[in-house]
Amino acid sequence: MSTGDRFQPVPEDHFTFGLWTFGNPGRDPFGDPVRPLPNLESIKRWLGILAEIGAYGVNLHDNDLVPFDASAAERDRIVAEFKKALKDTGLKVPMATTNLFSHPIFKDGAFTSNDPKVRAFALHKTMRAIDLGVELGAQVYVFWGGREGTEVDASKDPVTALKRYRECINFLCEYCIDNGYQIKFALEAKPNEPRGDIFLATTGAMLAFIYTLDHPDMVGLNPEVAHEHMAGLNFSHAVAQALEAGKLFHIDLNAQKLCRFDQDLRFGSEDLKGAFFLVKLLEDYNWPGMRHFDAHAYRTEDLDGVRDFCLGCMRTYKILKEKVRQFHEDEEIQAILRELNAGDEPLETRMAQYSRANATYLRDQFGYSDVADRATRGLGYERLDQLVIELLLGVRGS
Ligand code: GLT
Ligand code: MN
Ligand code: MN
């Protein structure tokens, strides 16, 4: 892959990767790791590689860095070494999270487990992980409840489960307030895998849940491309809803074929048009967050392939950003959009605000004869979409 051109990533692009992404050893339910398991030494090496290829930072679960059973002294030594490597490379840690899914203790959930001891342990572990995140400078704290669900619906009352989920998030908000932490929470939905069904399966469901919390202002969303695509949904629409609500606190960029298991593929490697409209949305609205990649290299790759994977995610984002610029400068596309978006000020003024007079006008004077031509008028979307396709295929624009 060529580097050093205008698509070469730079820290100002704010690209980030989870330690679990470049560290992914390629294990799957049917096969053993194909790459070495990560450790502190390999993490430090990767920080160097990521800095060299232009990333801004890394994100982590507590146990990506500190083993589950580490002593306090061991934890402090590891964190100190990691911080030194961050300083040496200039990389930041904008986001942190808790692993509440790998250890067998969480086999039936963490915050939604029926067992109060397990829920208490999940709070214990998360408070410590938040402390770690704050110590590393993270501003966003992600909650992905991978085990919060069921296979056996007889085992859990789903209403009680949601109350328990809420209680834990409320508790942790208070913990941050009490300690003066500025960190914000970002909830990540996923429909299934590893559980048969995961509670709050989509970004929209998560958004509704946020408004039932004690501190909804502290809590937003971390939508993931793959998770929405697993459910066959339009990712940009989910992100737009989060953005419009002021709740897009973080994002997990990757790629995925619709309705499959969580593939977590290189950004843009599937559904290129969907990826383009996602980048367009984030860039058009100047979304200020990190462009975080939650993906991993194919199982066929060695460590050079992982580097290619990281570079590929970032380059594709930048190339699509360039395509967004071309889209806005394409006269033919813009002329169609101007026509499609031609307003009707008097009519829109009447609709914008209810009044008895406006209602009377719309009910009694305005009617089908005013819109009949709309029923048969072609909208030209075939031409518009083909222009976008040709732009993406590189035969339009410069
Ligand atoms: C895990 C999961 C991701 C989450 C990460 C944060 S971990 O890899 O598949 O979607 O974002 O917990
Ligand atoms: Mn994710
Ligand atoms: Mn995923």
Image (tube, grey):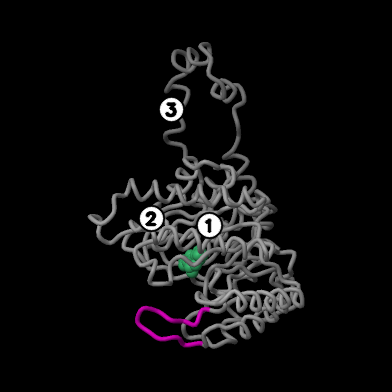
* SS for dot 3: helix
Queried whether the magenta region covers residue 25, the answer comes back as: yes
Sequence-first disc among 1 and 2: 2
Please provide percent x and percent y for residue 308: 60, 81
How far apart are the alpha carbons under marks 1 and 2?
A: 47 Å
Q: Can residue 287 be seen?
A: no
Sequence-first disc among 1 and 3: 3
Q: Can residue 350 be seen?
A: yes
Residue 187, which numbered label?
Answer: none
- Residue type indicated by callout 3: Ala
Quadrant into which the N terminus falls = bottom right
Residue 386, which numbered label?
Answer: 1
Please provide percent x and percent y for residue 291: 63, 62
According to the picture, the residue beneath numbered tag 3 turns out to be: 372
Q: Please give the count of numbered marks on the rendered protein.
A: 3
Q: Nearer the viewer, mark 2 or mark 3?
A: 2
According to the picture, the residue beneath numbered tag 2 turns out to be: 112
For the residue pair 280 and 64, the one nearer the viewer reads as 64
Please provide percent x and percent y for residue 169: 49, 50
Magenta residues, start to end: 24-35
For the residue pair 51 and 321, the one nearer the viewer reads as 51
Name above or below for residue 265 compared with residue 320: below
Please provide percent x and percent y for residue 88: 77, 77
Queried whether the magenta region covers residue 351, the answer comes back as: no
Contact between labelled residues 3 and 2, with CB atoms less than 8 Å apart: no
Local packing at callout 3 (Cα closer than 10 Å; few below 14, some 14-19, many 20+) is few
Local packing at callout 2 (Cα closer than 10 Å; few below 14, some 14-19, many 20+) is many
Who's the residue at 59% across and 63% down the image? 96
Name above or below for residue 47 compared with residue 214: below
* SS for dot 2: loop
- Residue type indicated by callout 2: Thr
Could you tell me what secondary structure mostly forms the magenta stretch?
Answer: loop
